[in-house]
Amino acid sequence: MTAEGKILHRTLFSLVLITLLFVAGCATTGDLRRVRGELNQQIQLTNERITGVEQGVVGGRAETATVLKEVEKTNEKTDEAIRSIRGGQAENRAATTELRDQIQQIRGAIDGLKRDLSSSSARTSKREEEEKGLREKLDNLTFKINFLENFLGIGKKDDTADTPVEKNIKPPAPPKEAVGKARTDKESLYAAAYELFREARYEKSREGFENFLKQHPDTEFSDNAQFWIGECYYFEKKYEKAIVEYDKVVKNYPEGNKVPFALLKQGLSFEKLGDKASAKLLLQQVIRDFPNTGQARIARTKLLEIK
């Protein structure tokens, strides 16, 4: 029960008591006055308390209304902030989607470039392989033609006593790539040694080819260079040394196309030294191992001359 309820309860109790006393006739006039005074005092206190309560209620309502207004303002600000955040999120999502689309387009362009580059590299590699193959074929044909011309007697300057089949060996031209405008170091070295050979400067030419092999021991020109070292000794009539150098062609470059040439010239060198047995063995090896070549035909012709 509240304080106001208690006051009203006591007041009603006093009224009931006075009434009972009055009815019973037991109360005096002084008692009635005293009771009335107390009653009036209680009523005044009750009214004051009721007024205080009412004022408190009104003040509480005003305070509550103020708080409610502040809450409403806060809610409005919160709602506005939420709307702003949502708007920013929507803009961010749109920007993110656009960036993703751009990234996807860039990736597509990169993939396309990679494919184009790979295709271009493959075509370039194929062209380089084809050009290399053509250069090797041309080099081999040039080598063979010149070698055969040498054996058919196309002009060696200082050897008129040799038999027609081996007379006047003319060196083959250097590979085509060594004649181009932009020579590499190895091509320049090879071409310079070749020019010395053509001028019959065999010692200088041999030194040039030896220097070439020191710097470039394993190139497309190396087996040629080794063969021409043997040729230099051969034309200097140093047949023992020529045999050793020809043998290096066979051992160091067994997969090269100069092996049949080197074996044939080894056989001719042994024949020059009077070792006909060794010469025959080597000439027969050329015929056996390289039966359908020009070197085999020359070896057959030479075997018919050796008795």
Image (cartoon, rainbow, N blue to C red):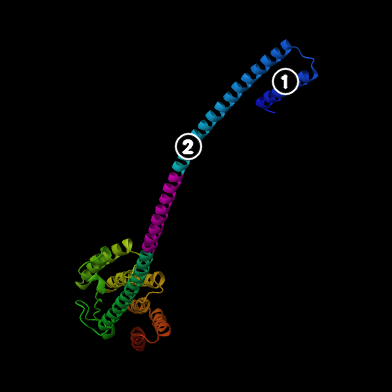
Residue that appears at 68% across and 16% down? 36
Cα separation between marks 1 and 2:
46 Å
* Residue 284 in view: yes
- Vertical side of 149 occupied by 188: above or below: above
Which structural element holds mark 2?
Answer: helix
Residue 106 position, x and y percent, is 36, 62
Reading the image, the residue beneath label 2 is 69
What's the residue type where badge 2 is placed?
Lys
User: To which quarter of the image does residue 96 belong?
Assistant: bottom left
Which structural element holds mark 1?
Answer: helix
Nearer the observer, 100 or 59: 59
Task: Count the marks.
Answer: 2
Which quarter of the rendered picture does the C terminus lie within? bottom left
Residue 239 position, x and y percent, is 32, 73
Q: Is residue 196 left or right of residue 296?
A: left
Which residues make up the magenta segment?
Answer: 79-107
Of labels 1 and 2, earlier in sequence is: 1
Residue that appears at 29% across and 64% down? 212
Crowding at label 2, few (<14), some or many (≥20) Cα neighbours within 10 Å? few
Q: Tags 1 and 2 in contact by the CB under 8 Å rule?
A: no
Reading the image, the residue beneath label 1 is 14
Crowding at label 1, few (<14), some or many (≥20) Cα neighbours within 10 Å? some
